[in-house]
Amino acid sequence: MQYASRLTRMTEMDVIDFSDSVVNRRGVRDPLTPTCLCPMGVIYAASMELGMLTERIAKRAGSDLIEFTGP
């Protein structure tokens, strides 16, 4: 929840340039672990809102997943 409250406003450039994006900015991303998929989920959703990613292409790409397997 801390991440969402710190991520208040995004511009088109935040979606286009992830490295300088508010989504990835230190201070905003601090409460997350390095493997957290939330920032990319925000980028994908914003891309769809801007019309940069169609629903059909998003469905074809599938989901992001990190799977931990044990011994």
Image (spheres, grey):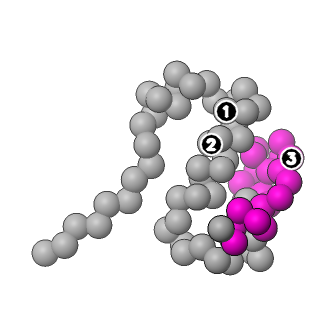
Tell me residue 29's x, y (percent).
69, 71
How packed mark 1 is, by other alpha carbons closer than 10 Å (few <14, some 14-19, many 20 or more), is some
Residue 20 is covered by the magenta coloring:
yes
**Dot 1: what SS?**
helix
Going by the numbered disc 3, the residue's amino acid type is: Thr
| Residue at the image position 52 percent from the left and 31 percent from the top | 58
* Residue placed under numbered mark 3 in the picture: 11
Residue 62, label in figure: none
Q: Which residue is drawn at 19% across and 72% down?
A: 70
Res. 51 in view: yes
Residue receiving disc 2: 44
Q: Does the magenta stretch include residue 53?
A: no
Q: Is the magenta stretch mostly helix, strand or loop?
A: helix
**What span is colored magenta in the figure?**
2-22
Point out the tag, 2 or 3, that comes first from the N-terminus. Answer: 3
Residue 16: image quadrant is: top right
The answer to whether 68 is drawn above or below residue 11 in the figure is below
